[in-house]
Image (cartoon, grey):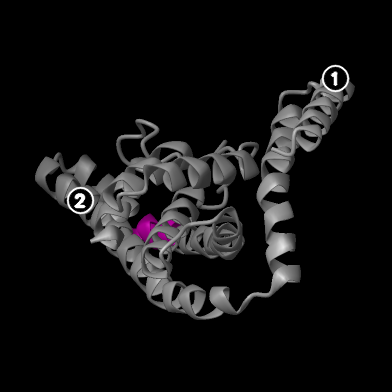
Amino acid sequence: MIAICGSLFCLDRVFIQAMVSRPVVIAPLIGFFLNNLYAGLIVGALIELIWIDRLPLGTYIPPNDSIAAVVAISVTGIAGSILGRVPPELIAFVVLLAIPCGMIAKKMDVLMIKSNDTLSDQALEDARENNMKAIEIKSCLGLLKVFLSYALFLFVAQMILTPFVIWIFPKFHEVPLRALAFTYYFLPLLGIAVAMNMLKLRNTIPIICAVILIAATIMEYFHV
């Protein structure tokens, strides 16, 4: 069900483009379906920040952050429900596992675009013949290919990653858990740095660093 819903939301990348496929939107939606909206908000924000500077401009095809977000929140939600908790370490671990899925899905997007070139050429021929029905069929066929490929990818990714996380996460000892805890708090800082670099706000970096240092000092002082 998550694979089907996630694939429908991911169609927004190529069809309606109403920003529903953005990680900060799609992850909370899937999290709501899994009865874990909080984890969806966290996962969506983390993945959104990681690839916030990768925009689909011109012929550039960015990593598929929508797929990565769906994989991350679905594995987090399902594994967390079975393990009985969703700690920050689990979220960080699954996000790290989901990032390569976005890169693999990017290659899949490239292949689909190339495969649709034939449909595009045929649609141009239909346009010359004023055959609107044939153009509609080819457009729907292109969307169907995207939907089925995304659904299959999400299903396979969940079938592989969810049992793996359920099996290995309880085996983690103190050292890897501490590393994952640091990663959980480091990822937002990395995303903020990427966003600042994209917006050319380099002059504000010392100010942001000072604010973060002050906040960390206060939190440490009060043992937050």
Q: Considering depth in this image, is 32 or 10 the residue closer to the camera?
A: 32
Which of the two labelled residues, at mark 1 and mark 2, occupies the earlier sequence position? 2
Q: Is residue 170 above or below residue 131?
A: below
Label 2, residues with CA under 10 Å away: few <14, some 14-19, many ≥20? few
Task: Indicate the amino acid at tag 1.
Answer: Ile
Residue at disc 1, secondary structure: helix
Label 1, residues with CA under 10 Å away: few <14, some 14-19, many ≥20? few
- Residue, disc 1: 207
Q: Quadrant of the N terminus?
A: bottom left
Badge count:
2
Q: Which residues make up the magenta segment?
A: 112-118
Q: Is residue 8 left or right of residue 207?
A: left
Q: Considering depth in this image, is 142 or 134 the residue closer to the camera?
A: 142
Q: Where is residue 140 drawn, in percent x and y?
A: 20, 51
| Residue drawn at 31 percent across, 44 percent down | 32
- Residue, disc 2: 140
Is residue 133 highlighted in magenta?
Answer: no
